[in-house]
Amino acid sequence: MPTKPSQTPLEQQRNRQPAADSDGDADPAKPTPETQIFHDRESQVASYCTEWPAVFDTARGCYQYSEDGTRYLDFFSGAGALNYGHNHPALRKPLLDYLTGEHVTHSLDTFTVAKRNFLEAFDRIVLGPRGLDYKVQFPGPTGTNSVEAALKIARKCTGREQVVSFTNAFHGMTLGSLAVTGNSMKRAGAGTPLYHASPAPYDDYFDGQTADFLWLEKAWEDSGSGLAVPAAVIVETVQGEGGLRAARMNWLRELHALCRRHEVLLIVDDVQAGCGRTGTFFSFEPAGIQPDIVCLSKSISGYGLPMALTLLRPELDQWDPGEHNGTFRGHNPAFVTATAALETFWTDDRLQRNVADRSEQLQDALNHIVESVDGAALRGRGLLTGVAFDDAEVAGKIQAAAFERGLLVETSGPESEAIKIMPALTITEDELAEGIDLLLAATGAVLKIDLSREPSLVG
Amino acid sequence: MPTKPSQTPLEQQRNRQPAADSDGDADPAKPTPETQIFHDRESQVASYCTEWPAVFDTARGCYQYSEDGTRYLDFFSGAGALNYGHNHPALRKPLLDYLTGEHVTHSLDTFTVAKRNFLEAFDRIVLGPRGLDYKVQFPGPTGTNSVEAALKIARKCTGREQVVSFTNAFHGMTLGSLAVTGNSMKRAGAGTPLYHASPAPYDDYFDGQTADFLWLEKAWEDSGSGLAVPAAVIVETVQGEGGLRAARMNWLRELHALCRRHEVLLIVDDVQAGCGRTGTFFSFEPAGIQPDIVCLSKSISGYGLPMALTLLRPELDQWDPGEHNGTFRGHNPAFVTATAALETFWTDDRLQRNVADRSEQLQDALNHIVESVDGAALRGRGLLTGVAFDDAEVAGKIQAAAFERGLLVETSGPESEAIKIMPALTITEDELAEGIDLLLAATGAVLKIDLSREPSLVG
Amino acid sequence: MPTKPSQTPLEQQRNRQPAADSDGDADPAKPTPETQIFHDRESQVASYCTEWPAVFDTARGCYQYSEDGTRYLDFFSGAGALNYGHNHPALRKPLLDYLTGEHVTHSLDTFTVAKRNFLEAFDRIVLGPRGLDYKVQFPGPTGTNSVEAALKIARKCTGREQVVSFTNAFHGMTLGSLAVTGNSMKRAGAGTPLYHASPAPYDDYFDGQTADFLWLEKAWEDSGSGLAVPAAVIVETVQGEGGLRAARMNWLRELHALCRRHEVLLIVDDVQAGCGRTGTFFSFEPAGIQPDIVCLSKSISGYGLPMALTLLRPELDQWDPGEHNGTFRGHNPAFVTATAALETFWTDDRLQRNVADRSEQLQDALNHIVESVDGAALRGRGLLTGVAFDDAEVAGKIQAAAFERGLLVETSGPESEAIKIMPALTITEDELAEGIDLLLAATGAVLKIDLSREPSLVG
Amino acid sequence: MPTKPSQTPLEQQRNRQPAADSDGDADPAKPTPETQIFHDRESQVASYCTEWPAVFDTARGCYQYSEDGTRYLDFFSGAGALNYGHNHPALRKPLLDYLTGEHVTHSLDTFTVAKRNFLEAFDRIVLGPRGLDYKVQFPGPTGTNSVEAALKIARKCTGREQVVSFTNAFHGMTLGSLAVTGNSMKRAGAGTPLYHASPAPYDDYFDGQTADFLWLEKAWEDSGSGLAVPAAVIVETVQGEGGLRAARMNWLRELHALCRRHEVLLIVDDVQAGCGRTGTFFSFEPAGIQPDIVCLSKSISGYGLPMALTLLRPELDQWDPGEHNGTFRGHNPAFVTATAALETFWTDDRLQRNVADRSEQLQDALNHIVESVDGAALRGRGLLTGVAFDDAEVAGKIQAAAFERGLLVETSGPESEAIKIMPALTITEDELAEGIDLLLAATGAVLKIDLSREPSLVG
């Protein structure tokens, strides 16, 4: 566990470089002996490392530590894969026990005790209390694999090819998922056209006056529209990568009703917004809808271990055995931590209450930014939230200034125009306050305004 | 660690069911209290569990144990993800240390000490000694993700769309990989047509007289052929899923030369055949070729933990940062076991010698089957090998009979016509002999012939 | 020329069937000795013959005659291919002279005197006076071939694949044109998915309140929208097949400006609405726009002979020689009648004035229907006009009742919900009045209302 | 009819340019007052005019005349659209009568007397005597439209998407037909990928030793091949555009049998090779096969007027009415000349005997070239024949040299490596001899050898 002296990167730099010459600005992305091998051997496709050029070593809760002992408060949480923080002891213990006990690690899709335990816990803790009836597919341990499985079974079950996705959607980088992803740079990466997906405007995409589903409803009813009734609509309730827009519950309900009317399947991609990120286990719970298919990954294992689920209404489970497969469907250490996470965090309401309280605390601070900056806008829901700026470059500068101060925040959106705040759901009031102070300081420094406030602790 | 009494399934069954009625044949696929939740909640897409309906709990080396204590000798090794056997102590120790030390588990594509250690080891132990110069992309921890990344960058770099794959190829289930996969049942699972892939005959597909690359060579040279020069050719050196055909080294060399002549990229999908499975680290080493792109996954972590690499010739590393991403690119526990695996098994030649010896021992036994059964044929290379039968149903029956005897073997091929033998590369002579005896017994029982032999120990 | 006694079908039937039994209703689609060969040998894809089961023989001006001498007033004009009526003597004369003189009939794309004469006339009479500068491509003598050429060159010139078309568009039945056609029955006829086309709402598709190009404008500006900026937009100014909706000039201007802003090519498919059908030679003239590409066919030859043009802004003429070809690009008899048609009808304003007057006369009558029938709506522009009914079956019944009365009118729209009125542009006031009376009688009979009026002659 | 003094272009040039300076070589492609409008207004896609920059005016039989009176012997026949020569009086007479009689010209797909006469003649003269039972579709009057209709109905009837075509096939320029066309330059003109077509080697594509259908047969039988059993195979019996290769009858029979075994439809594209070009009405007759679908166009009207047919086995006529349509399906003047052509040329065997005799006469001469030129090879069948040269530029030079001498010959093949000889089927022995002499002179001049022979008249 991290025992080195804890410092912010600024402190670290000051201590390390007493004799820095007047220019001072050592390029953080320049290779050092510690990072040389990455520059020599790792593909340039890696991106986070260029923004946060530290070499991370240890981590606990909402903190990460680089090998030189610098401490970073983590407001990114593995893009949502670490909802319960880093290396939570309640998950680590059963994981270590499992590994120590020589239990089966890799099992493809055979039955294992660990998988059974997970299924029973998922059934008892997640599905049952919410009145949800889904078959659980283990589609390979990544979000994009879950989405690919969802798209395939939706097309197979309906006999239709088209899938409607939304503007600025992000569903993954393999070819099927990429086709329903909006980002043009990432789409171009395919090197081929992308097929059988058509985008529709996400909630509040326009002027706020245009009826939400005017186009889809009309086009699907009109046999001459040229827009076929699709196999499915795939939606994120909050667009984690696409700029943090959050759909209103009423919009989701109308979308659900629209799909039902036209016998179109509704797929909710809850990979980033699920597992409590917005306050409830599934992000769509407040809307009172039951999607036909749900994609889960990221935080389902709870510990950052690769794992994914595709949940199917039972009548959609029309797979032939082996029709969709993959080597790492049976990653038992992930089943173990996933089970522990459900038992630890979802059998009472403490986590949900913390998310609610911390969301309020965070929103209060973000509103302070919004009120202080022309054209800034609050985005998101729960602890998947942030602020978008008119000048897209501002967000990137805040990210850099925050990193200098020991805070990891990311940007989001087609122009990277929003800062994105995703602390661990288990973060304490004090930890969040610390991060908020760093964020306000970084924002203030970038915009050359004073955002310092009374201590941000709530009552 | 497994301490329960170790029995074969037959022994187990005998002991468990003293009063079985005259019919006797309890359907192994019928739900039991132990498997009920799987039937209730898991998607019917799962396939291995229907063939091996045990609930596995512990595992060590080449043995797996079900929760009732039954012991299974594993001739499948996680479809090649467990080349060093289950839970090898030399990998488990650093894994436990890493987890205990609260080192960072999930890191996206930031720098970590664990990733650095892996890259250094991979550079020093794998690439350097083989004179190979590749950039390493971590594309998401599955084989199909590695293939998708390979196809995307090949298309991006060449500006061409088409990719040539081979008959009976298997490259994965996401849409890009599925397009270069041969199996028609799996292809139909896409629910849409598949794009920009055209199959060519694999080595020895025809009569043995037709020149190997007659068609591709002629068609690529002829501007009127209608077959565009492709971005890439993707090939497995041994078709692990497609019936265990192994390409001759000369065929690979000719393919390599053909691609070079036409400036077509050569992608070797070494997900199943790599990491020592055929005797060398990369399966293509004996051919003396350097592919442009190599896909690795399965056993690269060594411990069955999800991990994948895409190796790119440096001039092909033309990704924009983030152009291909994924949440689980930075799975540090896998980096740790992967590093340990390289250090343990690839810094001397003991493993390779064992693979050579065990391959010989195994081939001897399989030849015994081939010589005893009309129309049976030896397939594969190294410890990725097996026997194909004229009557495709024979293989499935042998699989079932082997399972009854406590041996896990799979089938392979478009008609599941071959039994597939993939023991751990670390298996001992005695362990292999034990498995061989079980296999011969199962085969003999199915074919109603006597295959028993002198003890199969070599020397 | 037709010399047989001229009768309406009703008169004809009465005279022919004095002893018809009380049932009376001989199925007009039933084979007769005269039509048996069609039933035996012609594909069932033929459709107009099932609605108008007469065997036509002669024709003059706006009248067609069946072989039994029945006279039909033609309000359909070959779906717009006979804008100057049947067999106009001013065109027939030069055609006969040409054929008699053994001038070259078929010439591929070599130079001929007849083609030169046409190009000179088209340049002098059509392009010059309108200030239009286009290269003329002869793409094969059909509308769909013209559209295919337009789509290909638009994609080649822009390097983009996507084309935006509109709801209820009709552009042709070959695969490229079909992809930008809205009708789902016709699209399904492809037997494959259709590619690289995305529909957008045509003018007045919604509630009349939604801004017209809100979606395209926003989506093209947003790099994360998932909707790529297309190669081109293809539009009909009046949707001849899709229900006779006519775009407002202002909508066309806005569309033109939108395309200019985003460097998207604007293709006007003037196959049906062009050649004077709406009052001006090109239907887009009143909007004051200059499309990048214009498709012409149908009435360009003036005589119903196959001929088509694709007009390209000079900088778009980036074809390699022979890159788009076709056997019947050089159909010289059509060039001859086309030249004669330009000289006869487009060197003064008599035709245009007649179209204006007849449009007014016709609109007056159609308004009478609209005012008399709940939910009926006037559609179209110029002499490409009609009435849509709430109850889609009404239009089909009016068609049948009109045919019985000796009037050929068609239906239009995804549900065939509109009657479509397209008389020859040369029709006289009296002839139009005759047809209007028949139409009102037919409509009245179907709807069981009295639509008879004062004589419909204007002035 | 042409009354101007008849000269070859060389004579013409000599007479016209007595004072040409020593350079002499006026660029024939340079605009003249006579051709200026073409350069100003016609798209550069036109290709024949650049090779034969004459302005043609009149034509009779196998001769064309430019406006300056130069006579050209036509060995191209409108790429096969003028099998009966230019303006044959036996066709012109009924055509003039029809037009003079004010018979209906344009009729969409209504019944007309002219269409009925054609169907009856086609039934009586073509189908009946050959024991063929086809439904006749009029798909729009061009070859590519016939092919598009064929592909659509084949896919609709089989529910499959893929179509197999052959290397160097040419089937048309609209998107569906282009996908089954081999030429890479023309394919690139699509501006998008082309879909659902996979090429296979045409007869004699390889070394002459590889079994013809080894690959298709094996791949279709192997569910793991990745090559789906297609909807159809489309084939030309002689590749008119693709280099004049002619399939052996036995190869066609084997292809037919292969298709039957796998329930794959066989489409013969007889657009260029049909209507007697190879000696029989359908080019496949000598093979004794009955294709499932036949495409006819070019010479079916007999007079160079646009017309096309798609012939369907009756059980394949599963179109919905109007599912494939087009404005010029009912081009009655073409029906009239088509009927006259059938009556004139196909009710006795004179034409066929002439084709046989002239083929022999022509082959004799072409063999003379082949024997005199290293690497030259005879290609084709009947009067769709020619000579391919090792040095592809030779063919183009012969074309130019022939044009100078008043002979129109084209080139064919992916590299335009073959000269293509397609005289009218009605050509006399003397006329053919004249053309042969010109061809030998041109070839001799290009290759600087003496090819003059004894007079080439047979017997």
Image (cartoon, coloured by chain):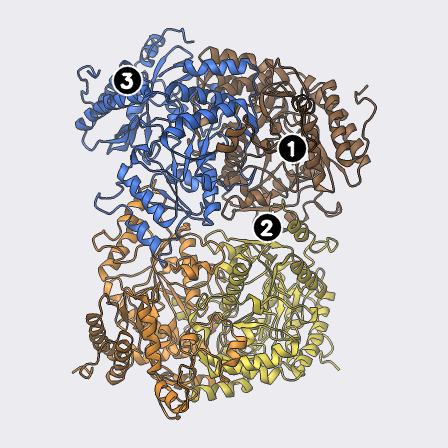
Chain colours: A yellow, B orange, C brown, D blue
Which residue in the protein does label 2 denote?
A228
The amino acid marked with disc number 3 is Leu
Other residues around mark 1 within 10 Å, as few (<14) / some (14–19) / many (≥20): some
Q: Residue at x 34, y 75 (%)?
A: B399
The chain that hosts pointer 2 is A
- Between circles 2 and 1, the one closer to the viewer is 2
Count the labels in the image: 3
Mark pair 2, 1: CA separation = 32 Å
Above or below residue D60? Residue C448 is: below
The chain that hosts pointer 3 is D
Mark pair 1, 3: CA separation = 55 Å
Residues flagged by tags 1 and 3 on a common chain = no
Which disc, if any, is residue D432? Answer: 3
Callout 1: SS: loop
Q: Are marks 1 and 3 in contact (CB under 8 Å)?
A: no
Which residue in the protein does label 1 denote?
C289
Mark pair 3, 2: CA separation = 58 Å
The amino acid marked with disc number 2 is Ala
Other residues around mark 3 within 10 Å, as few (<14) / some (14–19) / many (≥20): many
Q: Where's residue C247, x and y in %?
A: 69, 37
- In the foreground, B129 or A380: A380
Above or below residue C193? Residue B114 is: below
Callout 3: SS: helix
